[in-house]
């Protein structure tokens, strides 16, 4: 059965993201991407697994007649319910998506931009919920962080744990999962998430403070560890 794609158009970047529902393009190991020319890449389930969608850069400017992207007219094939297409190639999906969006951001991406620009967490929460309900899995991250900042840790934990799972190679997804787990007293989960965030921290981008938080948890664990009784102690 062809994978069913959810489409998101990021108008400010002119990028089309067409992935199986529930997946995100960020935080994916590089081994899961297969490039077709400089503007298109398929995302795969695993290094050798089936394709589960694609991302197109400079979507509106892509020359579909360029021989370097000729492969997108063939397999893999996908269903794109939003476009009314079944068993369609990436090329057919791109053409239909151009007509659908016509330079206008998708609904989910519109809510995403509004939510990220809203400083009031209560107002942002409503926008993140709209973004999520519009089909954007990336909203789990923004929603989780917002819920955390509002002190709603149990709800935040659920969304952030899910996002850490679907964006496993993103340091900030692992970091905030750790924060939510720590807030609920799940210290083993928190330490594991913080270690992963430290492994993924990029020196060229803003880093998390996962290393410091991990060290603090380790110190707390050491203080709670009972001392062994020595022979002769009562």
Image (tube, rainbow, N blue to C red):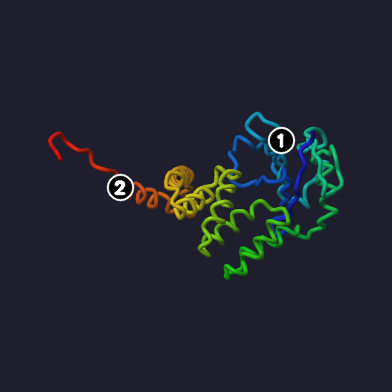
Are there few (<14), some (14-19), or many (20+) residues within 10 Å of tag 1?
Answer: many
Q: For this view, does 147 lie left or right of residue 78? A: left
If the image is split into quadrants, where does the N terminus sit? top right
In the rendered structure, find residue 134 and report the number of the disc placed on it. Answer: none
Residue 94 picture location, percent across and down? 81, 46
Q: Residue furthest front?
A: 234
Q: Are marks 1 and 2 in contact (CB under 8 Å)?
A: no
Residue 31 picture location, percent across and down? 60, 35
- Number of numbered discs present? 2
Residue 228 picture location, percent across and down? 22, 38
Per the image, label 1 sits on a secondary structure element best described as: strand
Instruction: Give how far apart the Cα atoms at labels 1 and 2 are.
Output: 48 Å
Residue at the spot 33% in from the left edge and 50% down from the top edge: 220
Comes first in the chain, label 1 or label 2: 1
Q: For this view, does 66 lie left or right of residue 204? A: right
Are there few (<14), some (14-19), or many (20+) residues within 10 Å of tag 2?
Answer: few
**Between 210 and 97, the one nearer to me in the picture:** 210
Residue at the spot 66% in from the left edge and 60% down from the top edge: 129
If the image is split into quadrants, where does the C terminus sit? top left
What residue is disc 1 on?
A: 51
Give the answer, above or below, for where 86 lies relative to 136. above
Residue 143 picture location, percent across and down? 60, 58
Q: Residue furthest top?
A: 48
Image quadrant of residue 79?
top right
Foreground disc of the pair 1, 2 = 2
Give the answer, above or below, for where 146 lies relative to 179. below
What residue is disc 2 on?
A: 224
Per the image, label 2 sits on a secondary structure element best described as: helix
Q: For this view, does 48 lie left or right of residue 86? A: left
């Amino acid at each position: 059965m062809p994978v069913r794609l959810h489409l998101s158009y990021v108008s400010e970047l002119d990028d089309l993201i067409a992935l199986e529902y529930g997946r995100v393009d960020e935080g994916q190991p590089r081994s899961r991407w297969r490039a077709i020319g400089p503007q298109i890449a398929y995302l795969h389930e695993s290094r050798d697994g089936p394709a589960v969608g694609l991302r197109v850069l400079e979507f509106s400017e892509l020359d579909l007649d360029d021989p370097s992207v000729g492969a997108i007219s063939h397999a893999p094939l996908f269903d794109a319910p939003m476009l009314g297409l079944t068993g369609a190639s990436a090329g057919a999906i791109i053409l239909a998506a151009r007509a659908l969006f016509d330079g206008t951001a998708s609904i989910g991406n519109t809510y995403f931009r509004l939510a990220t620009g809203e400083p009031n967490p209560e107002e942002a929460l409503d926008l993140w919920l709209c973004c999520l309900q519009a089909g954007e899995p990336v909203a789990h991250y923004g929603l989780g962080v917002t819920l955390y900042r509002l002190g709603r840790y149990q709800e935040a934990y659920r969304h952030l744990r899910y996002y850490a799972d679907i964006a496993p190679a993103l340091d900030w997804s692992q970091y905030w999962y750790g924060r939510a787990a720590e807030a609920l007293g799940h210290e083993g989960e928190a330490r594991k998430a913080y270690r992963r965030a430290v492994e993924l921290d990029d020196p060229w981008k803003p880093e998390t403070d996962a290393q410091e938080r991990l060290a603090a948890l380790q110190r707390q664990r050491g203080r709670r560890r009972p001392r062994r009784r020595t022979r002769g102690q009562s």
